[in-house]
Image: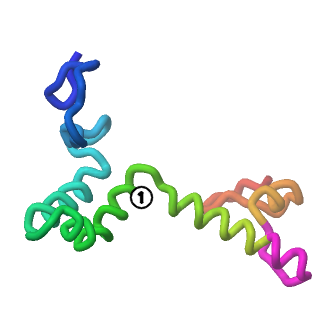
Amino acid sequence: FFFSGRRLGASLQGPRMASGFGTRAPVGRCFPVYREFAECISEKSGSPSEKAAACAELREDYVECLHHKKEITRLNALSDERARKIKAGEPVPSTLTEDAKSGTFRLPFTNVKS
């Protein structure tokens, strides 16, 4: 078995990017973001810490593409804001689940009623 030109189980020497091929597309979803980050690192001069500082935003974008941590944090923040508004008695829009339970949910572009 091979992965990125190396036999599985072989010791990895430093971080390596996968081949760039996606499972369902010719290019992996994060490969273009990785390429931008790699180009930034290779173009910058100075110590490794100076290069990392100069390309920090691109690195952050790449890590977000891989792991979606900010997206989860954003959803948690939205949920917390909704809970705060409900507790304070402020108006909030109904959720799709609430609409489906009440029978007011309609499928878009159809005449089908729930």
Give residue 10's quadrant in the image.
Answer: top left
Q: Mark 1 points at which residue?
A: 64
Seen from the viewer's position, the closer of residues 51 and 104 is 51
Q: In this view, does 17 lie to the left or right of 81?
A: left
Counting from the top left corner in percent of width and height, residue 77 is at 66, 69
Circle 1 residues within 10 Å: few <14, some 14–19, many ≥20:
some
Give residue 34's quadrant in the image.
Answer: bottom left
Q: Residue at x 48, y 55 (%)?
A: 68
Counting from the top left corner in percent of width and height, residue 25 is at 27, 41
Q: Is residue 59 left or right of residue 37?
A: right
Quadrant of image for the N terminus: top left
Q: Is residue 9 left or right of residue 41?
A: right
Counting from the top left corner in percent of width and height, residue 12 is at 23, 31
Q: Which residue is drawn at 14% across and 27% down?
A: 5
Give residue 94's quadrant in the image.
Answer: bottom right
Image mark count? 1
Q: What element carries label 1?
A: helix
Q: Which residue is drawn at 19% across and 67% down?
A: 51
Q: Does the magenta stretch include residue 10?
A: no
Q: Report the span colored magenta.
A: 83-94
Q: Does the magenta stretch include residue 91?
A: yes
Q: Which residue is drawn at 77% across and 72% down?
A: 82
